Image: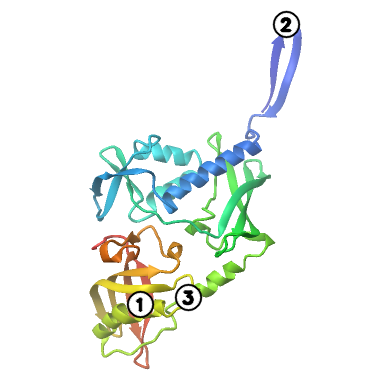
Amino acid sequence: MIIAAIMVIGCSLFVLADRDSSRPPVLTEEEAIELYSAAKEAFSWFELAGLDCSLGDIVGVTGFEGDAYYRVTDDRFQTLSDLEDHLKALFTDEIASDLLNEPTPPVYADVDGKLYCLDFDAGSDITKGEDSVCSIEQADDDSRLVTVHVDILDVETLSKIGVEEHRFLLRHENDRWVFGDFYLIAGTSGVGRGTVVEGTNDQDAQVRYDIAEASLSNIRFHAAGAEEAALTFVREVYGQHLMNLPQDNRFSITGYALMEYSLQEVIDKTVSGTFVFAVNPRFRVYYVGLYTRAGAGEYEGWLISHKRFVLRQDDNDQWSCVSLEELHDEHPW
């Protein structure tokens, strides 16, 4: 339906505008920039570091007893509903729901009507510098493409060596503009995203090379039986593999210590177990994660992880790791 907005001032008639009421309002550059900035901030609360919280107000959450939650002190969010409303003002309901419910354990929880948060600090990608919204394009009547450029920084000098382009879709839903897809350029969700439009980002290729070099897929070792294989893996093989990586590999370490180990299951030529270990990484940012904990005491400055492994014996009686996953249901340390 076409609506003519009409005002009568004195004896004069002014037609201010004609517009189709079914079409969304114009999205200005300023509005797009504000939305992107707010969305980036909100996403960081789930990937980089949680909201400000009181370390003196700690509780457990039913179903996730091994994880400590702390009372959020950010005045904007008294309850989980406050946080959810904020997310739904920036993202589609699906993205907001995924942020709140997909992580296990969830980053945020409701405890007696108050908002609590896991205490974590994952750090950001140091090779990503300043970012800015550079254009807005119409995808269709209800969608806009927002293009963001970010400086690529040299990992050692932190000087600019290029520019990377990222594109995000804004949708007009429920009388508001929200992001229909989003990721944090400098976070884990932004790894491998974007297109180089200026200069170079040979570091992307280097990251892939480092990951391949750090992979356990080519590591084989002998052991007399499944139980010995499991113990050898957590006590020697895994740590030595990381210690022997080239010093410029992002996943290289200078120290490894096994803290706890538990054998889970032995079936035919397969054995599984869990282990808690500490590493002293050369490049801390590539090891810090949501479920990684900072060491203390003799492990001050180290990082502690809890992982589950699966080993399999091949026809040549050699053992290899076929699965290694981070655990976050409990933290026995």
In percent of width and height, residue 20 lies at 68, 30
Q: Residue at x 29, y 76 (%)?
A: 272
Figure quadrant of the N terminus: top right
Question: Of residues 299 and 194, which is closer to you in this image?
Answer: 299
Residue 320: % across, % down: 37, 83
95 and 34: which is toward the camera: 34
Q: Secondary structure at mark 2?
A: loop
- Disc ID at residue 135: none
Residue at the spot of label 2: 10
User: Sequence order check: which comes first, mark 2 or mark 1?
Assistant: 2
- In the picture, measured across the screen, residue 23 lies left or right of residue 291, that is right
Q: Earlier in the sequence, mark 1 or mark 3?
A: 1
Q: Secondary structure at mark 3?
A: loop
Characterize the local packing of mark 1: few (<14), some (14-19) or many (20 or more) Cα atoms within 10 angstroms. Answer: many
Residue 274 at least partly seen: no
Question: Does 302 sit above or below residue 229?
Answer: above
Residue linked to disc 1 = 239
